[in-house]
């Protein structure tokens, strides 16, 4: 069976390649049809955060772990600071919860559009023959005359404004500086709130109007695609039929309610959060139980034990381990293969039909809600792309709500200050744009003794587990 | 030009985040309009977090959009500095991406090849990349590219000095580009632009400098003195008056009530005194803010030892408070407050006396 490799996979953070076994012998009527019978996802890079964090002041972790990813540093910072909140026994103040939500929501309105337009966008623009989403190959003229790259170009602008809002509260982006156990370091002021609103209005317009318009164009293009495949292959194949997984969707939840943090602190609840936690399976919601997470390493370059819960996790790299093909461990939940990400968030929170309002934050104009119904119960490219756009809109809507709420906390404490504990354990469970993210810390003698991260990329691009079951991405 | 699918894909694949110039836009635009020759950029990433290119995407004046579409080379109509190869943004994947590296950048004979490197260099086996079907260690690609590059820029702390991956306790032997090239006896100068992430202005302006033929003056760490020549604490900090008066934030998040509800961040771990960079002046994200402004300490991410040496632990104050005229600043602070109090009292007495006179 011939092998085919796509390496490097571009437009990602880090280094990855995919090795495919191809069977070309299926449909004799269709010219040059290839079917993938086996896929290996290989993560090619190892830095070793879980090793060099040991022995450090626990607070260093909230800044260092952001450098796990410079596209998504914020969620790492948030997961880390929450692990420290937990370990220090320092529940964040309401002002701090709002500030963290604002930083994160603004950040999402940069991240999801970047993915939608710069990372996966070119494929969608080309497959959908939708010029605004194709990179602006013909420059200014091309944008003007052909609309070639018009939305791609607007995205570059809008993401910058969103990141300015992140910087207003976080110091800079990438890599924010204003989180601290028990709260944040940054005082809320009216001018920061006003400056944020001004920028977020433009971001909101981009997300609610341009991005949604492009989503609908892709949905329409998908219909045309299905007509083509029906004619050529004899069956309708659209983007909702590609990228199918297990139908198991895992979410840890994000954006707690600042008036009911107790709900947030129990990861199996999180009912008041904007996005819920959950372990949706077989078409129904399942309550999330953090104890059911484990990581296998049979095919990963580690000789640490397999099947550990991350609070007891270990990382001993072994780059020449026989049979291994990747630096990613294989996370599993409840001994099943789970997908994480925008689709997992929407399904666990809203089920299979979603509706989000589009009311302009300052003019009050109602542009009509956007609605979507899940196409494929086991997930698909189309469903994930739609979920991403809907999440971006949810964040754009809610950042205004939180900014205005924060006005009521201008003189309130921003840190519930606690000293570094001598012996403690903590965990932080959050949602990065790519999906469920967890950090687990053990502190001994006031220093980090163990630090483990299970990041969304490893759920979705996981290798085969100890039972030889492939991860989500390889089931397509 | 007729856009066919084939030439479209090829053209689209050449795009990526480019960097160009613009502090003095009109002058530089004039210069570029006359530049006949095209600069080739290859951007390699090693042990990286990708924060550096994301940081570049935050460039303002010019912003990335202007860089990609408005500023063009002579009559070519092409944007000024278009990377031939850049993994994080290339529309092409796999072999097609590699073609631009192998067939375009490497085969260019003009003396106008710039290599931008992001990410640390590690021991063999920890970072492998396939280019045009050949899988090799990043360090081997780097050695190959550095040998033929005309200029080498290390963007961010990782590529400059090893950065986060070279933290104490790392097992991958992470180091910066310059240290690696020295080991391999590849005798090429490297311009280091540390900070974590790299600051977009530093890349844009350095590329601009190189393109117009001005090699920036470098300090002993290979950093352009224009960005890194001044100490943050001594030469840049807007909170220095608080330090001089002995007014400190004693605990994170608890700001002094007076005099301006602000305070020096020294006691919460600020490493400004050992940081040589211009963040306080230039700030970040279109000058909206920077680390210290949001009530946090500077962590001196511009320094070679980051995240260790003098920079660690991040929230613990530096062991020795720099002296001012032979006395620690706290003493000065107390003295000045006392003097102020006496001064105010004297002023009050005088005013009262004057009022009495007027009556």
Image (tube, coloured by chain):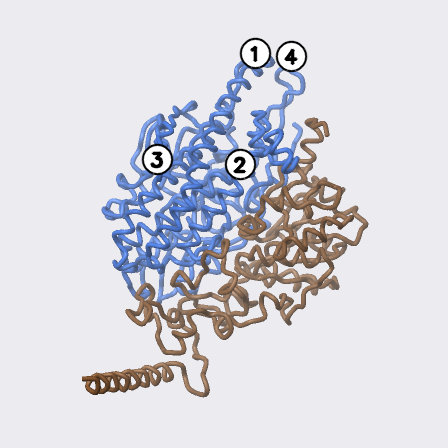
Chain colours: A blue, B brown
The reply, left or right, for residue B267 in relation to residue B12 is left
Q: Quadrant of residue B249?
A: bottom left
Q: Position of residue A452 (x, y in %)?
A: 42, 52
Q: Quadrant of residue B135?
A: top right
Q: Nearer the viewer, residue A3 or B266?
A: B266
Residue at mark 1:
A234
What's the chain of the residue with tag 1?
Answer: A
Q: Earlier in the sequence, mark 1 or mark 2?
A: 2
Q: Position of residue B99 (x, y in %)?
A: 72, 40
The reply, left or right, for residue A402 in relation to residue A66 is left
Question: Which element type, helix, strand or loop, lies under badge 1?
Answer: loop
Residue at mark 4:
A29
Within 10 Å of the Cα at label 3, are there few (<14), some (14-19), or many (20+) other Cα atoms? Answer: many
In this rendering, the label closer to the viewer, 2 or 4: 2
Q: Are marks 4 and 1 on the same chain?
A: yes
Q: Are marks 1 and 2 on the same chain?
A: yes
Q: Position of residue A29 (x, y in %)?
A: 64, 12
Q: Earlier in the sequence, mark 2 or mark 3?
A: 2
Residue at mark 2:
A117
Height in image: A453 above or below A415? above
Residue at mark 3:
A279
What's the chain of the residue with tag 3?
Answer: A
């Amino acid at each position: 069976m011939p092998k085919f490799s796509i390496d490097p996979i571009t437009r990602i953070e880090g280094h990855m390649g995919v090795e495919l076994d191809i069977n070309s012998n299926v449909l004799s009527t269709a010219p040059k049809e290839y079917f993938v019978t086996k896929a290996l996802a290989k993560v090619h890079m190892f830095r070793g955060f879980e090793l060099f964090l040991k022995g450090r002041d626990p607070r260093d972790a909230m800044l260092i772990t952001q450098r796990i990813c410079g596209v998504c540093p914020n969620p790492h910072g948030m997961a880390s600071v929450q692990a420290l909140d937990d370990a220090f026994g320092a529940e964040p103040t309401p002002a701090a919860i709002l500030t963290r939500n604002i930083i994160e929501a603004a950040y999402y309105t940069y991240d999801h559009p970047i993915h939608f337009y710069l990372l996966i966008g070119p494929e969608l623009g080309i497959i959908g023959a939708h010029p605004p989403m194709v990179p602006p190959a013909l420059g200014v003229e091309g944008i003007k005359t052909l609309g070639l790259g018009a939305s791609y170009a607007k995205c570059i602008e809008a993401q910058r404004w969103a990141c300015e809002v992140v910087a207003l509260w976080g110091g800079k982006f990438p890599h924010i500086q204003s989180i601290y156990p028990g709260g944040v370091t940054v005082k809320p002021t009216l001018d920061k709130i006003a400056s944020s609103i001004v920028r977020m209005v433009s971001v909101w317009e981009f997300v609610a109007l341009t991005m949604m318009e492009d989503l609908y164009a892709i949905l329409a293009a998908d219909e045309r695609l299905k007509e083509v495949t029906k004619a050529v292959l004899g069956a309708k194949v659209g983007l909702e039929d590609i990228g199918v997984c297990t139908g198991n969707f895992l979410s840890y939840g994000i954006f707690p309610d600042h008036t009911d943090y107790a709900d947030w602190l129990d990861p199996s609840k999180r009912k008041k959060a904007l996005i819920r936690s959950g372990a949706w399976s077989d078409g129904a919601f399942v309550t999330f139980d953090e104890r059911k997470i484990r990581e296998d390493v049979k095919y990963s370059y580690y000789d640490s034990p397999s099947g550990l819960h991350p609070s007891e996790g270990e990382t001993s790299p072994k780059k020449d381990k026989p049979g291994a093909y990747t630096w990613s461990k294989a996370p599993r939940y409840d001994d099943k293969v789970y997908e994480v990400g925008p689709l997992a968030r929407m399904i666990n929170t809203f089920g299979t039909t979603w509706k989000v309002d589009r009311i302009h934050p300052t003019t009050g104009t109602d542009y009509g809600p956007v609605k979507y119904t899940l196409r494929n119960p086991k997930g698909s490219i189309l469903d994930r792309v739609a979920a991403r756009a809907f999440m971006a809109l949810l964040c754009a809507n809610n950042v205004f709500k939180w900014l205005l709420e924060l006005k009521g906390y201008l003189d309130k404490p921003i840190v519930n200050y606690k000293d570094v504990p001598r012996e403690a354990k903590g965990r932080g469970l959050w949602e990065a744009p790519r999906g469920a993210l967890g950090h687990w810390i053990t502190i001994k003698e006031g220093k980090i003794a163990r630090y483990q991260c299970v990041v969304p990329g490893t759920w979705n691009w996981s290798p085969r587990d100890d039972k030889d079951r492939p991860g989500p991405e390889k089931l397509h | 030009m007729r856009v066919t699918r084939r030439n479209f894909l090829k053209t689209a694949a050449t795009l990526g985040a480019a960097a160009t110039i613009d502090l003095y836009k009109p002058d530089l635009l004039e210069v570029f309009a006359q530049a006949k020759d095209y600069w080739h950029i290859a951007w390699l990433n090693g042990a990286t977090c990708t924060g550096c290119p994301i940081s570049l995407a935050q460039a303002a004046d010019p912003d990335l959009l202007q860089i990609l579409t408005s500023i063009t080379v002579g009559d070519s109509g092409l944007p000024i500095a278009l990377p031939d190869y850049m993994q994080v943004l290339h529309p092409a994947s796999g072999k097609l991406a590699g073609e631009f590296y192998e067939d375009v950048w490497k085969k260019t004979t003009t003396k106008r090849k710039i290599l931008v490197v992001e990410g640390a260099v590690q021991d063999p086996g920890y970072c492998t990349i396939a280019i045009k079907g050949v899988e090799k260690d990043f360090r081997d690609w780097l050695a190959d590219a550095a040998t033929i590059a005309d200029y080498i820029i290390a963007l961010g702390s990782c590529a400059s000095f090893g950065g986060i991956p070279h933290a104490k306790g790392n097992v991958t032997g992470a180091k910066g580009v310059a240290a690696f090239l020295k080991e391999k006896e590849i005798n090429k100068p490297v311009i280091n632009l540390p900070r974590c992430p790299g600051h977009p202005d530093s890349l844009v302006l350095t590329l601009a400098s190189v393109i117009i033929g001005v090699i920036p003056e470098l300090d002993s760490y290979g950093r352009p003195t224009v960005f890194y020549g001044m100490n943050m604490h001594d030469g840049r900090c807007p909170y220095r008056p608080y330090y001089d008066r002995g007014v400190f934030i004693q605990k994170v998040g608890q700001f002094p009530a007076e005099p301006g509800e602000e305070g020096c961040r020294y006691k919460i771990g600020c490493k400004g005194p050992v940081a040589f960079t211009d963040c306080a002046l230039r700030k970040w994200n279109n000058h909206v803010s920077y680390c210290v402004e949001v009530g946090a300490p500077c962590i001196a991410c511009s320094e070679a030892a980051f995240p260790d040496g003098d920079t660690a632990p991040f929230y613990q104050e530096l062991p020795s408070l720099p002296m001012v005229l032979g006395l620690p600043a706290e003493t000065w602070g107390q003295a000045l407050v006392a003097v102020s109090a006496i001064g105010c009292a004297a002023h009050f007495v005088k005013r009262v006396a004057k009022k009495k006179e007027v009556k």
